[in-house]
Amino acid sequence: MRRINLALQGGGAHGAFTWGVLDRILDEDDIEVAAITGTSAGALNGAAFKAGMVQGGRDAARANLDWFWEQVGAVNAPDAQAWLQALGPAAGVIAATTAISPAYMAFDAMARMTSPYLYGDIFANPLARIVRDMRFDDICSDRGPALYVGATNVRTGKIRVFSAAELTPEALMASACLPTLFKAVEIHDPKTGRVEAYWDGGYTGNPALFPLYQPTLPDDIVIVNINPLVRGDVPKTAEAISNRINEIGFNTSLLGELRAVAFVQRLLAQGALQRGTMKAANIHMIEDDALMNNLNVATKTIPQPIILARLKAAGRAAADAFLADHKDDLNQRSTVDLEAMFN
């Protein structure tokens, strides 16, 4: 049995890519997910995955992920997905058309120029209805994979990681709270004795890797990356510039943690650190930057069935390619060259 940890990025509706990755991993009976750390859409995917695993194993996890994304807006029937993908325009065309549609432009302008505190509940997060229906007894259970959910403390600017009994609907909503769209989520913190306000965890950990460094967890961390690390072209339109700023910001914390992992790996390889004194993390990554480069912030914000179906299919394909190339590397070595990444 190969034991792994999953690190699931946030990225709005683009989290449907992670849905596909998880769906494919569930096919592998000899891979066990020991722990999941997630932010925003990654946290929601992780919660749906865990609740299903606790309730009824792999089939239930797959069904629970399907249910979640059906609620978000996906068409899950295989025949419907085939029709959508065959008849729909290219992903880049849909993304560009959505970004310049009058409805989206009006929504985007309002979000940029007004505060979600001005108009009462008009900016209520539509995920709240879905999150309330998730099975929190299973999500908080000590069975199944450990689950860690990151949110950003508005007052301190630090990451707060929720786990176990702390995994309430409010914690998941906090992890997915974009401050330009929604009011901060307020949660009582027993450590400070005060009510703290939280925004999206992507600002401080997208996702946070450090909860996975516990000695009882496996060394292997499989990162499902949905924010492109690299874009070949320099953005020149206002929308493209804003989108790239968002991507860079939401990747910064992850790159910082990966740089630290690379430093520890180098010290261990040089013998400057004794093995066992620090976690010798094996880093793997599942991504499809080519697809994500064709999408934008509009397709993150608006869950369109055609895009969601294609993202799920792309996630399955990316996970399938990763497993074909690197399944035998799991529990053996890293498949991401961190030194090359930072040089």
Image (tube, rainbow, N blue to C red):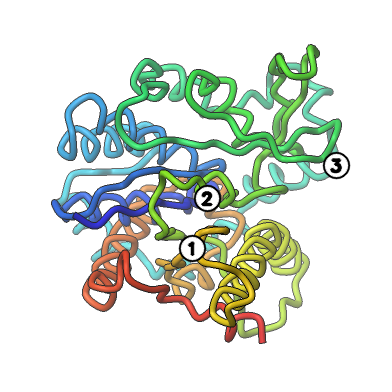
Camera-side residue of 187 and 213: 213
Camera-side residue of 268 and 15: 268
- Distance, label 2 to label 3, CA atoms, is 41 Å
Answer with left or right where residue 43 lies relative to residue 247: left
* Residue type, mark 1 in image: Ala
- Secondary structure type for disc 3: helix
- Secondary structure type for disc 1: loop
What residue is shown with label 3? Answer: 113
Q: Position of residue 54 (x, y in %)?
A: 26, 27
Camera-side residue of 219 and 93: 219
Residue drawn at the location 63% of the way across and 60% of the way down: 254
What residue is shown with label 2? Answer: 213
Q: Position of residue 141 (x, y in %)?
A: 36, 21
* Residue type, mark 2 in image: Tyr
Give the label, 2 or 3, closer to the camera.
Answer: 2
Residue drawn at the location 51% of the way across and 71% of the way down: 294
Residue drawn at the location 58% of the way across and 62% of the way down: 296
The answer to whether the residues at label 1 and label 2 have Cβ atoms under 8 Å apart is: yes
- Secondary structure type for disc 2: helix
* Residue type, mark 3 in image: Met
Answer with left or right where residue 181 lies relative to residue 65: right
What residue is shown with label 1? Answer: 281
334, above or below 305, in the image: below
- Upstream in sequence: badge 2 or badge 3: 3
Give the label, 3 or 1, closer to the camera.
Answer: 1
- The answer to which quarter of the image holds residue 311 is bottom left
32, above or below 326, in the image: above
Q: Position of residue 226 (x, y in %)?
A: 50, 60
- Upstream in sequence: badge 3 or badge 1: 3
5, above or below 314, in the image: above
How crowded is the residue under tag 2: few (<14 C-alpha within 10 Å), some, or many (20+)?
some
- Distance, label 3 to label 1, CA atoms, is 43 Å
